[in-house]
Amino acid sequence: GGDGGDGGDGGDGGVGGGRQPMPPPPASMEDVEVLAADLHEDEVPGRFLRATGGDMEEAKKRFAATTIWREDYKVDEVLTEHQPYFDEIKRFYPHYIHGRAKGGQIIYIEQIGALDLAGLESHGVGVANLLRHYVFNSEFMWTKVNPDPNAQCVTLMDLRGLNMRDFAGQAQDLVKGVTAIAQTHYVERSSRIFVLNAPFWFAMPWKIVSPLLHPNTRKKVNIQGVGTFGALWEAIDESSLPPIYGGTGATRSNSCM
């Protein structure tokens, strides 16, 4: 889900078991402007226009930058690539789709507090692999689950189990990288973002993370303390929420992808 982190050197392993490169740097302004000039207005998804407040010329530039990025990063190939670390990533970084919100949006849940970078690293999975998996996951969501070019999701980010020391090193590289990809290339894909089970000390790292977010994205973020889920019911029926978030829906094991 989502709305050029630097990311370091990248992890070993990746597509086909080889070294996975980090996502490419942003396209040059010259390349973006050349492509944007050739775009017709009806080629630009409406969400890019929403993101720019109705500025079509800026929307064309942002869509052109994403088009170049998709080509450079071979995004259209990601769903047919071999995924040698899929099981390990799902094991050490729980995330899943869980039905639909009241407005029909996909409900996407990430249990960030359960992210085990050491466990992933022990299986040869680095930040570059995780960023590629994020793109794989996003492409699956927006190609297979809901291919509408303007479709959105409601994102639940569960911080239960998160420690203050987790906001450093590779974890920070991952957050920066995912944030950059989501905001730049999966524009206006999140309608609401609920941060759940936020510990009392979360205000400190939030000061680091929030400036990375576009103002439109920050407006969508709703931070809830430990065990507080009432705000979710504005967007999601209780029957569509797992019991761990105060709902009555089926558990993850038999309800979702």
Image (cartoon, rainbow, N blue to C red):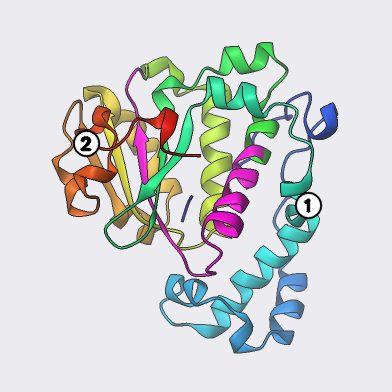
Q: Which residue is mark 1?
A: 77
**Segment colored magenta:** 133-161
In the image, taking residue 248 as reference, residue 81 lies left or right, namely right
Label 1, residues with CA under 10 Å away: few <14, some 14-19, many ≥20: few
Residue tagged 2: 248
Where residue 101 sits in the image (x, y, percent)?
A: 31, 54
Q: Residue at x 47, y 51 (%)?
A: 2
130 left or right, relative to 83: left
Whether residue 27 can be seen here: no
Q: Quadrant of residue 219?
A: bottom left
Tell me the quarter of the picture where residue 21 sits. top right
Residue at point 55% right, 42% down?
178
Q: Is residue 226 above or below residue 63?
A: above
User: Is 132 displayed left or right of 96 in the figure?
Assistant: right
Q: Secondary structure at mark 1?
A: helix
Which image quadrant is residue 253 in? top left
**Closer-to-camera residue (190/104):** 104
Give the residue drawn at x 77%, y 71%: 31
Is residue 136 within the magenta segment?
yes
58 horizontally vs 236: left or right: right
Q: In the displayed structure, would residue 227 be above or below residue 75?
A: above
Can residue 126 be seen at all in this image of the molecule? yes
Q: Could you say which is closer to the camera, residue 124 or residue 203? A: 124
The crowding category of the residue bearing disc 2, from other C-alpha atoms within 10 Å (few below 14, some 14 to 19, many at least 20), is some
Where residue 106 appears, as percent x and y from the top left, is 41, 53
Residue at figure coordinates x 40%, y 31% from the top left: 252
Compared to residue 153, the image places residue 59 above or below, namely: below
Q: Secondary structure at mark 2?
A: loop
- In this view, the residue in front, 123 or 251, is 251
Residue 121 among magenta residues: no
For badge 1, the amino acid type reads Glu
CA gap between label 1 and label 2 equals 38 Å
